[in-house]
Image: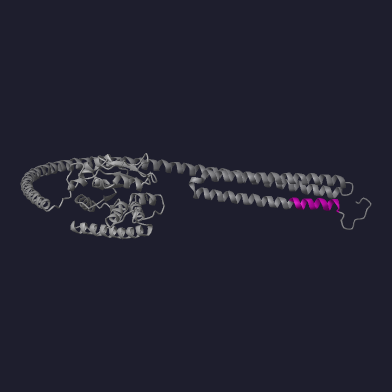
Amino acid sequence: MGSGHSHQSEPEWDPIEWAQRELREAEERQTRAEEAARHAEEAAERAAREAKEQRQRGHAAKLAAERAAQAAREAAERIRQQKEEARRAEQRTREEAETHVHEEAEARAHEEAEARAREETEARAREEAEARAREETEARAREEAEAHAREEAEARAREEVEARTRREAEARAREEAEARAREQQARTERILQQRQRQEEEARRQRALEEETRRTRIAKEEAEREAREATELARKAQAEREELEKLLKKGIQPVVMPTFEEIRLAKAKVQYNDAMFHFAVAGIAGSGKSSLINALCGMNNSDPNAAPTGVNETTMEISRYVDTAHPERFVWYDVPGSGTLGTPDWQYFNSQGLYVFDCVIVLFNNRFTATDQAILTNCQHFQIPTFIVRSKSDQHILNLMMDAGYDPDVEDADSREQYYRIAREQYISGTREAVEKNLTQANLPKQRVYIVSKKALFLAAKNRQPRGMIDEVELLTDLYSVAYQSGRFA
């Protein structure tokens, strides 16, 4: 029974007890297999009930029942194999112990044979039960499928009947709707024809009223135009009479140029919107060319200087770009009045002074009616103006000579005294005379800038000349007007 070694922790099993233990385990496995078969049968019955309750899933239930039966068969087959293995194990054990337990082994073999017979009988019974269950399930599935097919056929038949009924009803409804539509269209056409006749009559009535209204308006317009023509004629006569009265009083009128005249005047002087345009105007011989040369920082002898002379050298407007600011300022030498055969009051328009951005009114000995006319028109056109008296050094020297100054005998102190008195006399006399002339012309008070060519030239060169009067102020104010115009923003 042993190998000669003693192992207290491991019991020694008798071959009979071992075989009995194997049989008990086989019987337990058989019980479990039978329980599984019973569960499979119950599952098959539940599947059958579900197939009956849910007709559309009959085929699936059938497949489930077949799978359950197949599982039961496979379980039975596994049990049979296990029993066969147990039998073979028992056979081996009996062979090993048959010298000692021959009779007991035969008894156990007899019992096993009986057990196998019982198992085979039970297996056949289970197989027959499974076969009957399958047949019943298949029969129920066929019945349910046939019932479902009949129901579907009946439903299709009902649907076809209902569809024919609907089509017939729709056809009748369309026919009735078309008949009603034709009738409605006929009524609408009759209404439209009646309305068209009414509208045509209304249009004729409106056309008649419109014609009457246009005739009345034309008559009123003709009467209004006649009244306006009469009023224009009356105003023209009144303006002519007023103009004659003004001319008799020596007051010159302000004449508005046309758009075409403005365009031509700008083209003539090459007007550039990006630059500021200074015009120097005055009577002939007032020193306009010399003033422009000094303002531009040039001597009269420079190649680009404005030509100067004793007589009036400018018969057309001359254009001079500022040499210090060639992209911003341009100066114009305007022909002096009295040299073109143009009346004083027409000088402003004839020279196109209305297109310039600033006008310098230059005079030498006296403030003339032409100067007043230029200032009046500039005020009307809102053009900034500067009144400038030129050749101040010469005028002061003349006053010194009139007072008895002799350069050959007077010393420096005496000359300075003569100069100071003559200078104050010249400045105050010039300002009083200009103020008086402005008041007589009904013009607002305005500063007069008293300058000399030499001092202005040096001021333009940023130098401080001796005997300077208003030269620096003139340059500062001229450029301030230009920059404040917004032209160079």
Specify whether residue 123 is in view: no
Protein image colouring: one colour
Q: Quadrant of residue 313?
A: top left
Residue 168: x and y in percent read: 28, 40
Residue 17 lies within the magenta run = yes
Total labels drawn: 0
Q: Quick one: 249 or 470, which is closer to the camera? A: 470
> In the displayed image of the protein, which residue is found farthest to the right?
4
Residue stretch rendered in magenta on the structure: 13-26
Q: What type of secondary structure mainly makes up the magenta span?
A: helix
The answer to whether 371 appears left or right of 293 in the picture is left
Specify whether residue 392 is in view: yes
Q: Quadrant of residue 196?
A: top left
Residue 422: x and y in percent read: 30, 58
Residue 390: x and y in percent read: 29, 51
- At a point 37% along the width and 57% down the height, the residue shown is 411
Residue 269: x and y in percent read: 28, 41
Residue 233 lies within the magenta run = no
> In the displayed image of the protein, which residue is found farthest to the front?
409
Q: Quick one: 267 or 333, which is closer to the camera? A: 333
Q: Quick one: 184 or 240, which is closer to the camera? A: 240
The answer to whether 77 appears left or right of 470 in the picture is right
Q: Is residue 114 above or below residue 7?
A: above
Q: Quick one: 121 or 298, which is closer to the camera? A: 298
Q: Quadrant of residue 95?
A: top right
